[in-house]
Image (cartoon, rainbow, N blue to C red):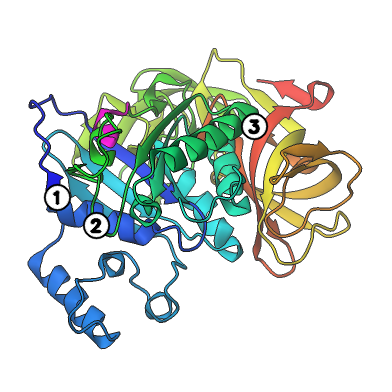
């Protein structure tokens, strides 16, 4: 039996956003369902619906299939796989959580990229029965590389189905060592390990009595103690303009405001700002919301900004601190995860969308491609295929704020869109602008 965990009451640690990732059938949905169930994050009617769905699938006398708490799409329930990203919310006595259960199938890697871009941590599941001779599955390696590329600093490796290997400490140790070698290769610094049985609940919320050799915390305890690593308010100001709001009246006080979300830093009334790419300087006259004016607005807050003078400001422009040095570039090197079934063809036309700004782009060349199985980089390549990870050089028709993703994720991330089909072809992260092609505002 699993013994209840007794921990002293801690201070509120805020909100932690995390994803679950791994290969198909590693047990991600079951783990999240178990976490929600045992942490009492499931409503009675939800659990009743899961019981009915379990019976409909032939499990008349079976325990509720907790994976159904996250596998909400009908196609997912029929196939037994996760297709879409399922978001769930729950709270423990010390923290609130936002969980993104991401697809394990290689076909849906784009969904994992989307969820990982806003996560503080990743729970990587590994099926203890599927690791042979220390060889991790390719999708486990791919998801780990993507988590690192997207700046996720905290990784919890949940070695699942430990009950199916007779709770063998040796199996846990071998898988832990194999993943530690992978983490060292790709640069994951903060990695923690926990053996679990998602189906039975061992070491998920309650400590398992069937693994006396494991003295570490449960999965929930690990998640409660992780620091929320994103502190976008401490970064330099970035305010991408989403919409220009005009209102005319009978008085001379016509309204002109610039609506958007503060992507990084803090916007302050009375502060001098520069509009990019034009370079014009103005003072923030007011920061408006539905609830009235604010003296400041931090990253994540949606507001409307009024300036002290009329300027030519459009959707896609970015407000930054007037005295800040900000790179503007028409040519950048970037890491991309290729998400299109059609391979990258440099002759095709693309749109690059970074924040609220969209510009025409050309793939000048493919610099390299990463083999996720061997983690070796090949430079003798001229294209990328579905789910490939590589580096490219992009030439843009107009300049963009070209922050490196590692420095300011909000303005360092972009997507490439096929100009003909309008399908998203790649998710990208700016490595650096080319110095010779960079203007400094």
Q: Which residue is mark 3?
A: 277
Q: CA distance from mark 3 to mark 2?
A: 56 Å
Q: Position of residue 385 (x, y in %)?
A: 76, 58
Q: Earlier in the sequence, mark 3 or mark 2?
A: 2
Which stretch is magenta? 222-227
Q: Are marks 3 and 1 in contact (CB under 8 Å)?
A: no
Q: Quadrant of the C terminus?
A: top right
Disc 2 crowd, CA 10 A, few/some/many (<14, 14-19, 20+): some
Q: Is residue 439 left or right of residue 185?
A: right
Q: Which residue is mark 1?
A: 1
Q: Earlier in the sequence, mark 3 or mark 1?
A: 1
Task: Please indicate, yes or no, whether residue 295 appears anywhere in the rendered image.
Answer: yes
Q: Are marks 3 and 2 in contact (CB under 8 Å)?
A: no
Q: Nearer the viewer, mark 1 or mark 2?
A: 1
Disc 1 crowd, CA 10 A, few/some/many (<14, 14-19, 20+): few
Q: Nearer the viewer, residue 401 or 284?
A: 401
Q: Is residue 357 above or below residue 8?
A: below
Q: Which residue is mark 2?
A: 200
Q: Position of residue 327 (x, y in %)?
A: 67, 23
Q: Is residue 428 left or right of residue 301?
A: right
Q: CA distance from mark 1 to mark 2?
A: 10 Å
Q: Secondary structure at mark 2?
A: loop
Q: Residue at x 58, y 50 (%)?
A: 132
Q: Main secondary structure of the magenta part?
A: helix
Q: Is residue 114 above or below residue 291?
A: below
């Amino acid at each position: 039996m699993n013994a209840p965990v007794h921990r002293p009451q801690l201070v509120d640690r805020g909100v932690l956003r995390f994803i679950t990732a791994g290969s198909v059938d590693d047990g991600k949905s079951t783990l999240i369902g178990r976490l929600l169930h045992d942490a009492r994050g499931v409503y009675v009617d939800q659990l009743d619906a899961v019981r009915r769905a379990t019976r409909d699938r032939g499990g008349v006398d079976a325990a509720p299939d907790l994976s159904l708490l996250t596998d909400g799409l009908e196609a997912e329930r029929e196939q037994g796989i996760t297709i879409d990203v399922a978001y769930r919310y729950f709270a423990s006595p010390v923290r609130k959580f936002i969980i993104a259960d991401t697809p394990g199938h290689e076909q849906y890697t784009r969904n994992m990229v989307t969820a990982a871009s806003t996560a503080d941590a990743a729970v990587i599941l590994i099926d203890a029965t599927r690791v042979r001779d220390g060889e991790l599955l390719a999708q486990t390696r791919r998801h780990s590389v993507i988590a690192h590329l997207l700046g996720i600093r905290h990784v919890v490796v949940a070695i699942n189905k430990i009950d199916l290997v007779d709770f063998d400490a040796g199996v846990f140790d071998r898988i832990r060592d194999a993943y530690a070698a992978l983490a060292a290769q790709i640069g994951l610094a903060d990695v923690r390990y926990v053996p679990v049985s998602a189906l039975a609940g061992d070491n998920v919320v309650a400590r398992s009595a069937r693994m006396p050799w494991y003295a570490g915390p449960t999965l929930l305890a690990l998640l409660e103690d992780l620091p929320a690593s994103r502190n976008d308010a401490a970064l330099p100001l970035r305010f991408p303009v989403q919409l220009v709001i005009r209102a005319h009246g009978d008085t001379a006080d016509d309204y002109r405001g610039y609506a958007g979300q503060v992507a990084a830093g803090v916007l302050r009334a009375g502060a001098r700002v520069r509009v990019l790419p034009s370079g014009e300087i103005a003072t923030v006259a007011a920061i408006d919301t539905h609830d009235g004016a604010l003296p400041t607005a931090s990253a994540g807050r949606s507001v409307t900004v009024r300036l002290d003078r009329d300027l030519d400001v459009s959707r896609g422009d970015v407000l930054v601190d007037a005295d800040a040095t900000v790179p503007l570039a028409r040519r950048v090197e970037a890491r991309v995860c290729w998400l299109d079934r059609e391979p990258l063809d440099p002759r095709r036309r693309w749109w690059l969308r970074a924040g609220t700004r969209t510009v025409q782009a050309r793939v000048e060349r493919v610099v390299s491609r990463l083999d996720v199985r061997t983690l070796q980089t090949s430079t003798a390549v001229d294209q990328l295929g579905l789910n490939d990870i590589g580096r490219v050089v992009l030439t843009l028709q107009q300049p963009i704020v070209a922050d490196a993703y590692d420095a300011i994720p909000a303005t360092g991330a972009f997507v490439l869109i096929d100009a003909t089909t309008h399908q998203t072809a790649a998710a990208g992260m700016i490595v650096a602008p080319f110095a010779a092609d960079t203007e400094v505002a």
